[in-house]
Amino acid sequence: MSLTSLRERIPSRLSDFFNPWEEWLHNGKALFDGEWALSVPAANISEDKKSYHLTLAAPGLKKEDFDVRLDGDRLTISAEKEESKEEKDAKYSRKEYNYSSFSRSFTLPEEVLKDKIDIKYDNGVLSISLPKSEQTQNSTSRKLTVN
Protein backbone atom coordinates (compact mmCIF):
# COMPACT_ATOMS: atom_id res chain seq x y z
CA MET A 1 0.00 0.00 0.00
CA SER A 2 1.43 3.36 -0.94
CA LEU A 3 1.71 6.24 1.53
CA THR A 4 -0.65 8.33 -0.61
CA SER A 5 -3.40 5.73 -0.52
CA LEU A 6 -2.89 5.32 3.24
CA ARG A 7 -3.37 9.07 3.77
CA GLU A 8 -6.52 8.96 1.69
CA ARG A 9 -7.92 6.14 3.85
CA ILE A 10 -7.16 7.67 7.26
CA PRO A 11 -9.77 10.46 7.17
CA SER A 12 -12.57 8.05 6.28
CA ARG A 13 -11.46 5.56 8.96
CA LEU A 14 -11.39 8.36 11.55
CA SER A 15 -14.77 9.61 10.40
CA ASP A 16 -16.18 6.09 10.68
CA PHE A 17 -14.86 5.92 14.24
CA PHE A 18 -15.97 9.36 15.44
CA ASN A 19 -19.43 9.56 13.82
CA PRO A 20 -21.13 7.18 16.29
CA TRP A 21 -19.50 9.07 19.18
CA GLU A 22 -20.65 12.40 17.76
CA GLU A 23 -24.22 11.11 17.70
CA TRP A 24 -23.93 9.74 21.25
CA LEU A 25 -22.40 12.93 22.61
CA HIS A 26 -25.25 14.97 21.19
CA ASN A 27 -27.96 12.46 22.13
CA GLY A 28 -28.59 11.86 18.44
CA LYS A 29 -30.09 15.36 18.19
CA ALA A 30 -29.91 17.26 14.94
CA LEU A 31 -28.28 20.59 14.46
CA PHE A 32 -30.86 23.27 15.30
CA ASP A 33 -30.29 26.95 14.48
CA GLY A 34 -26.53 26.41 14.36
CA GLU A 35 -26.33 24.67 17.76
CA TRP A 36 -26.90 21.14 18.95
CA ALA A 37 -30.11 20.56 20.83
CA LEU A 38 -29.62 20.30 24.58
CA SER A 39 -27.07 17.58 25.33
CA VAL A 40 -25.28 16.63 28.52
CA PRO A 41 -23.63 19.82 29.79
CA ALA A 42 -19.99 19.82 30.78
CA ALA A 43 -19.28 20.22 34.48
CA ASN A 44 -16.54 22.27 36.10
CA ILE A 45 -15.56 21.26 39.62
CA SER A 46 -13.30 23.37 41.81
CA GLU A 47 -12.40 23.49 45.48
CA ASP A 48 -11.36 26.09 47.99
CA LYS A 49 -10.74 25.81 51.73
CA LYS A 50 -14.44 26.10 52.65
CA SER A 51 -16.35 24.49 49.75
CA TYR A 52 -16.45 22.49 46.58
CA HIS A 53 -17.99 24.32 43.62
CA LEU A 54 -19.81 22.61 40.78
CA THR A 55 -20.94 24.57 37.70
CA LEU A 56 -22.81 23.38 34.65
CA ALA A 57 -23.36 25.44 31.51
CA ALA A 58 -27.01 24.91 30.57
CA PRO A 59 -28.19 27.92 28.56
CA GLY A 60 -31.76 28.26 27.38
CA LEU A 61 -33.32 26.74 30.49
CA LYS A 62 -35.27 28.25 33.35
CA LYS A 63 -34.59 27.41 36.97
CA GLU A 64 -37.93 25.58 37.03
CA ASP A 65 -36.64 23.18 34.36
CA PHE A 66 -34.07 21.67 36.76
CA ASP A 67 -34.60 18.78 39.13
CA VAL A 68 -31.76 18.45 41.68
CA ARG A 69 -31.91 15.50 44.05
CA LEU A 70 -29.68 14.25 46.84
CA ASP A 71 -29.87 10.53 47.58
CA GLY A 72 -27.30 9.61 50.24
CA ASP A 73 -24.00 10.82 48.83
CA ARG A 74 -25.23 10.98 45.21
CA LEU A 75 -26.20 14.37 43.77
CA THR A 76 -28.25 14.09 40.57
CA ILE A 77 -28.97 17.06 38.34
CA SER A 78 -31.46 16.68 35.54
CA ALA A 79 -33.47 19.00 33.33
CA GLU A 80 -36.24 18.72 30.79
CA LYS A 81 -37.40 21.27 28.29
CA GLU A 82 -40.36 21.08 25.98
CA GLU A 83 -41.12 23.62 23.29
CA SER A 84 -43.77 23.81 20.67
CA LYS A 85 -44.21 26.39 17.98
CA GLU A 86 -47.14 26.78 15.64
CA GLU A 87 -47.51 29.04 12.62
CA LYS A 88 -50.71 29.43 10.70
CA ASP A 89 -51.23 31.21 7.44
CA ALA A 90 -54.03 31.14 4.90
CA LYS A 91 -52.05 28.73 2.73
CA TYR A 92 -50.27 26.50 5.24
CA SER A 93 -50.00 25.39 8.84
CA ARG A 94 -46.75 24.33 10.53
CA LYS A 95 -46.27 22.95 14.01
CA GLU A 96 -42.88 22.09 15.52
CA TYR A 97 -42.27 20.26 18.76
CA ASN A 98 -38.95 19.85 20.55
CA TYR A 99 -38.13 17.87 23.69
CA SER A 100 -34.69 17.79 25.30
CA SER A 101 -33.40 16.37 28.56
CA PHE A 102 -30.21 15.46 30.41
CA SER A 103 -29.15 13.91 33.69
CA ARG A 104 -25.78 13.99 35.49
CA SER A 105 -24.86 12.36 38.80
CA PHE A 106 -21.96 13.08 41.13
CA THR A 107 -20.77 11.23 44.21
CA LEU A 108 -20.15 13.75 47.00
CA PRO A 109 -17.21 13.51 49.40
CA GLU A 110 -18.08 12.61 53.00
CA GLU A 111 -17.07 16.04 54.33
CA VAL A 112 -19.81 17.90 52.41
CA LEU A 113 -22.46 19.43 54.67
CA LYS A 114 -25.47 18.09 52.78
CA ASP A 115 -27.98 20.34 54.58
CA LYS A 116 -26.07 23.51 53.55
CA ILE A 117 -25.87 22.96 49.77
CA ASP A 118 -26.63 26.19 47.87
CA ILE A 119 -27.88 26.16 44.25
CA LYS A 120 -28.24 29.13 41.90
CA TYR A 121 -29.05 29.47 38.21
CA ASP A 122 -28.02 32.68 36.49
CA ASN A 123 -27.27 33.57 32.86
CA GLY A 124 -27.30 29.95 31.69
CA VAL A 125 -24.99 28.63 34.42
CA LEU A 126 -26.11 26.35 37.25
CA SER A 127 -23.81 26.91 40.25
CA ILE A 128 -23.80 24.57 43.22
CA SER A 129 -21.82 25.32 46.36
CA LEU A 130 -21.04 22.29 48.51
CA PRO A 131 -19.70 23.50 51.89
CA LYS A 132 -17.20 21.36 53.78
CA SER A 133 -17.45 20.50 57.46
CA GLU A 134 -15.51 22.82 59.81
CA GLN A 135 -13.24 19.95 60.78
CA THR A 136 -12.18 19.60 57.14
CA GLN A 137 -11.80 23.38 56.73
CA ASN A 138 -9.49 23.60 59.74
CA SER A 139 -7.24 20.74 58.69
CA THR A 140 -3.80 21.87 57.68
CA SER A 141 -1.93 20.55 54.72
CA ARG A 142 1.68 19.52 54.88
CA LYS A 143 4.24 18.13 52.52
CA LEU A 144 5.01 14.47 52.93
CA THR A 145 8.28 12.74 52.18
CA VAL A 146 8.43 9.96 49.64
CA ASN A 147 10.59 7.08 50.95
Image (cartoon, helix red, strand yellow):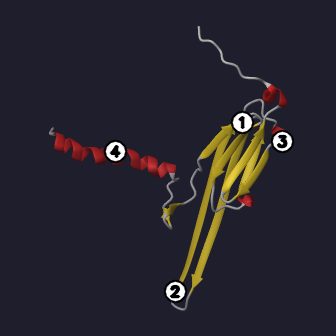
Q: Could you tell which of marks 4 and 3 lies nearer the N-terminus? A: 4
Kindly identify the residue that appears in the image at 67 percent across and 54 percent down.
Answer: 125
Q: Could you tell which of marks 4 and 2 lies nearer the N-terminus? A: 4
Q: Could you tell which of marks 1 and 2 lies nearer the N-terminus? A: 1
What type is the residue that disc 4 sits on?
Leu
Q: Nearer the viewer, mark 4 or mark 1?
A: 1
Q: Which residue is mark 2?
A: 92
Q: Nearer the viewer, mark 1 or mark 2?
A: 1
Q: Could you tell which of marks 1 and 3 lies nearer the N-terminus? A: 1
Label disc, if present, on residue 14 of the rendered structure:
4
Q: Nearer the viewer, mark 1 or mark 3?
A: 1
Q: Which residue is mark 3?
A: 116
Q: Are marks 1 and 2 in contact (CB under 8 Å)?
A: no
Q: CA distance from mark 4 to mark 1?
A: 41 Å
What type is the residue that disc 3 sits on?
Lys
Kindly identify the residue that appears in the image at 70 percent across and 19 percent down.
Answer: 142
